[in-house]
Amino acid sequence: MKLHYDAKTYNKLDRPFDSVVRFTKVTLPSMGWSKGEEEEVVMDVGCGPGKLTSQFILPCFPKLKKIIALDAIPGMIEEAESSHPHPKIEYAVANFEERSSVIQWKGQITKFVCIQCFNRIKNQENGFKTIYDLLQPKGEAALLFLLHNGYYNAILKIAEDPNWKSFFTVNVTDCIPESHLKKYSALHFKDMVKDVGFTIRYCREKQNVTTFANDEEYIDFYYSVCSLVPYIPPSKVDEFKRDLLFYIIEENGRNSDGTPVDKTTTLELVLEK
């Protein structure tokens, strides 16, 4: 199943979750990522509309030569170039899962970053191998990605809903990360990256709760990234959003004041080649 993103809506709603802010503003600096002596060549995979790249990743590197910011969705790169340009950021369309699209940078990257994206890579072991090959000796990689999210259970539920089941002519589990379906923990990925050849500098599994301002913001955010959207007729969009919100709230719940919350388990990794 192909990735689906409404780039303009996602860009409008995009605000880094607390876990992302903590990882980029606290964890990475504490590990010396802002103290390098040489000019850094950074690769950011899954850059989206560029806000995270320009406002959170770029400030990590006082001595920066350039950031190569990649996304598989052309619309995301268009939004990034329009909304978040920077002379030291080179945006490009590239599918990281296709090794041929990134191998031109083999051995050139000093720091690799992938935030809230690696969970969508189907063959994650191959993904780690590609990262290893892109890095210079002693180069480092920082990844933060979802292991589990109630949203994915909501997707599985709506796919079996009699009102919607007939619309989906694909295997809906293809849009659910393997880590969620198989309930992987940090241990699974520790073993994987060690087998690739990495040294683990940091590994943490974290539980996160994020509050959204209202139901409209919450469902608009998830609708903008939902892989089922291309199968929904325009006349059914409002009804689909209503039902999807129902299932997401059923999984993730609300605060006492009624505001919707998003509950996730994420994995944070810092690896050295």
Image: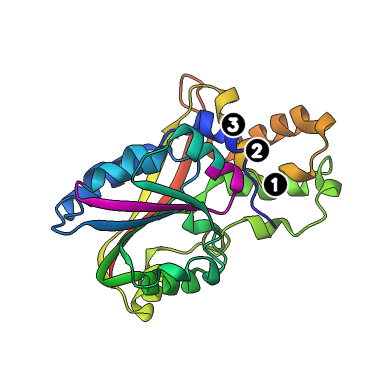
Among the two numbered marks 2 and 3 on one chain, the one whose residue lies closer to the N terminus: 3
Report whether residue 240 is seen.
yes
Q: What residue type is labelled 1?
A: Lys
Query: Are the residues tagged 2 and 1 within 8 Å (C-beta)?
Result: yes
| Residue 122 found in image quarter | bottom right
Q: Which corner quadrant holds the N terminus?
A: bottom right
Mark 2 is surrounded, within 10 Å at the Cα level, by few (under 14), some (14 to 19) or many (20 or more) other residues, namely: many
Q: Which corner quadrant holds the C terminus?
A: bottom left
Colour theme: rainbow
Residue nearest the observer in this picture, 260 or 88? 88
Residue denoted by label 3: 9
Residue nearest the observer in this picture, 33 or 175? 33
Mark 1 is surrounded, within 10 Å at the Cα level, by few (under 14), some (14 to 19) or many (20 or more) other residues, namely: some
Q: Residue at x 67, y 48 (%)?
A: 227
Q: Locate residue 96, reporting x and y percent.
A: 52, 62
Among the two numbered marks 1 and 3 on one chain, the one whose residue lies closer to the N terminus: 3
Residue denoted by label 1: 157
Residue denoted by label 2: 247
Distance between the alpha carbons at the discs numbered 1 and 3: 24 Å
Distance between the alpha carbons at the discs numbered 2 and 1: 7 Å
Furthest residue in direction right, as rendered: 166
- Total numbered labels placed on residues in the image: 3
Q: Which amino acid does label 2 sit on?
A: Tyr
Distance between the alpha carbons at the discs numbered 2 and 3: 21 Å
Q: Locate residue 148, reporting x and y percent.
A: 50, 53
